[in-house]
Image (tube, rainbow, N blue to C red):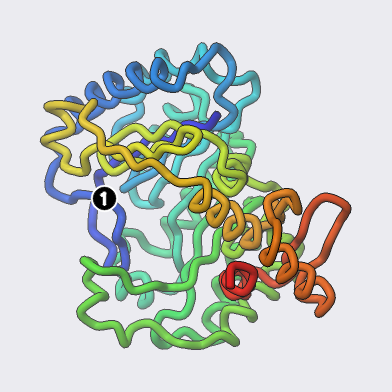
Amino acid sequence: MLLYLHIPYCDSKCHYCSFNSYVDKFDTRKRYMEALCRQLSFELERFAVSEQSIETLFIGGGTPSTVAAELYAPLFNLITPYLKKGAEITTEANPNSATEEWLRGMQHLGVNRISFGVQSFDADKLKALNRAHTPYQAIEAIQTAQNLGFQHISLDLIYNYQGDTQALLSQDIEQAFSLPIDHISAYELTIEEGTRFNMTPEVRQENDALAFYVANEIQRRGFPQYEISNYGIYQSLHNKGYWELKNYIGAGAGAVGFLNDTRYYPTTDIDHYITDPLLCAEERLTAEELQTEKLFLGLRSDIGVPKSLLSGRMLLQAELLVKEKKLLASESHLFNQNYFLSDELALFILS
């Protein structure tokens, strides 16, 4: 069982961001966190969660570091009995708001992994993406987290923004590896509806060579790739839980939960959520839809695809890919060696 908490507040709206987040609702933070507790209490019952059965907790957003650590305390008081001993507890954070005081407060609550939204160490690129921090703040925040003794530190990078070159990305990767991190998430810029960049789609480069360059450079420096966008000497248990399609509670405005064959969608509007945090849409997935999701997720990561998932023509198609050395086969699973081709391989198996 996994747990995700969504914090929908941000200092600024990044031009590429399609996540549910607000830059003008800071006066609602205390009431929002109280509503989050109410929903979480309900979800713990709906999911029939037993003590010490939550393997991972991930606090995402938005920007969790825009909410004071003390406002998280009631949530942790509620959650703690259900957390497995030694559970991975991650929070996202932005360098400009992840102060030493905030980091110390979250650590005191039990957070043992920080994922910093860095995106780049190039000042001009950060400004173009509408990031609220400077390269220096990113470096300082990561070093502060290390000095406080956080077990695991990750950072995000973005590539294939217009003007990205091997030289610029090499500098970003070099700077990242000079810092005390054990994980990198490297995302290709995508243009999503409702974002600022949707009006200027030309800001996204179509450069497959840069994608392979980033992947190769990160791996060359010692971080194995274990999913299409994730690398590290530490592999996030929460990420892997999603790719294994484990059950997960999603609490907060804009979160998503999943139980067996049903997805749960709390309302995305902060004010409506505060009024009624139990208001939730449901989506039932068919056996065929679940099979398709497991196939796509397995090929995007080192989780792999159980052979038992496939039968008939799908199994024959997969065996053909093994013969062509596009997939590796163990006794029980199929594994993809090139995650950038994962969707094409999945579609071939489904054809």
Q: What residue is at 30 percent from the left and 31 percent from the top? A: 68
Q: Quadrant of residue 194?
A: bottom left
Q: Is residue 52 above or below residue 235?
A: above
From the viewer's side, name the closer residue of 345 and 100: 345
Could you tell whether 338 is left or right of 238 in the image?
right
Q: What residue is at 63 percent from the left and 79 percent from the top? A: 212
Disc count in the image? 1
Q: What residue is at 70 percent from the left and 72 percent from the top? A: 338
Could you tell whether 345 is left or right of 108 in the image?
right
Which residue is most to the right? Answer: 331
From the viewer's side, name the closer residue of 313 and 163: 313
Q: Is residue 230 above or below residue 143?
A: below
Secondary element at tag 1: loop
Q: Residues within 10 Å of mark 1 (few under 14, many from 20)?
A: some
Which residue is most to the front? Answer: 312
Could you tell whether 127 is left or right of 60 in the image?
left
Q: Quadrant of residue 44?
A: top left
**Residue 25 spot, x, y in % from top left:** 13, 42
* Quadrant that contains the N terminus: top right
Q: What residue is at 28 percent from the left and 43 percent from the top? A: 254
Label 1 is placed on what type of residue?
Answer: Asn
Q: Is residue 65 visible?
A: no
* Quadrant that contains the C terminus: bottom right
Q: Is residue 216 above or below residue 149?
A: below
The residue wearing badge 1 is 20
Q: Quadrant of residue 66?
A: top left
**Residue 229 spot, x, y in % from top left:** 57, 63
**Residue 219 spot, x, y in % from top left:** 72, 67
Q: Is residue 73 visible?
A: yes
